[in-house]
Amino acid sequence: MTPSRLQSLLTPYLGDHPTPATLYDQLAAYLDLLLKWNARTNLTAIRDPEEIVRRHFGESLFAGVHLARKLAPDATVLDFGSGAGFPGLPVQLLLPQLHVTLAESQNKKSTFLREVVRTLALPTQIHAARVETLPAETLFDAITLRAVDNTPAALAAAKPHLAPRGWLVLLTADQPTTTTEIFPIPGTTASLLTLEQL
């Protein structure tokens, strides 16, 4: 997919937020890697490239836009259960000064994440194990969760690693019971971005 087509598909998620000059070229390379790996190992159930861009890249970048309004440029972010890198990798590409850690315990997925980070020469860290194995003193300014299997259990594991006044960022189809801010994700009636400061 061309960078210009990516830009066209992603504009609704980014609005007027400034983007790095390299963003669409890097996203195109990321998409190519994802499609190649997904052909032989199931990283995402979505197969259509444009749908991948809208659902995975778009929703992740939408979260990044809102994180940019909450965090210092060099803040730390943990992507809990990163899977194929969403939302952590697009957030890193949008906000290159952030210190992003991708936590993914499944070997095939963490291997893919390492390949993307190496190919795109990103500063992103990979924690190829469960979040519970992080040192207790390891804290983050924001923790993102998207499509995790058991949200209550994931939140229980995530919260000890959230710095004081840190942000929990959920991309979810579930209406949260308590949260500070809720944003409908463009292009969908089912998905929400929720931000809660603890």
Image (cartoon, rainbow, N blue to C red):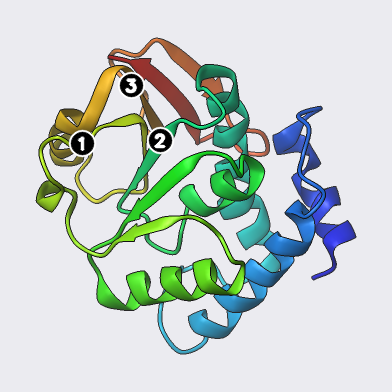
The tag earlier along the polypeptide, 2 or 3, is 2
CB atoms of marks 3 and 1 within 8 Å:
no
Mark closer to the observer (1, 2):
2
- Residue 158 is marked as 1
Q: Distance between the residues labelled 2 and 3?
A: 24 Å
Name the residue at 58% across, 40% down: 97
Reply above or below: 86 against 3: above
Secondary structure of the residue carrying tag 1 is helix
On residue 64, which mark appears?
Answer: none
Question: On the rendered structure, is 161 left or right of 46?
Answer: left
Q: How far apart are marks 1 and 2 (CA)?
A: 14 Å
- Residue type at mark 3: give it: Pro
Q: In this view, does 137 lie above or below 125?
A: above
Q: Position of residue 127 (x, y in %)?
A: 28, 59
For image coordinates 55% across by 60% down, the residue present is 122
Sequence order check, earlier mark of 3 and 1: 1
Check disc 2 and report its element: helix, strand or loop.
Answer: strand
Dot placed on the residue nearer the N-terminal end, 1 or 2? 2
Tell me which amino acid carries mark 2.
Thr
**Number of other residues with Cα within 10 Å of mark 1, as a class: few under 14, some 14 to 19, many 20 or more:** many
Residue hosting label 2:
76
Mark 1: which amino acid? Ala
Give the labeled residue for mark 3.
176
Q: Please tell me whether mark 3 or mark 1 is closer to you in this view.
A: 1
> Quick one: SS at disc 3?
loop
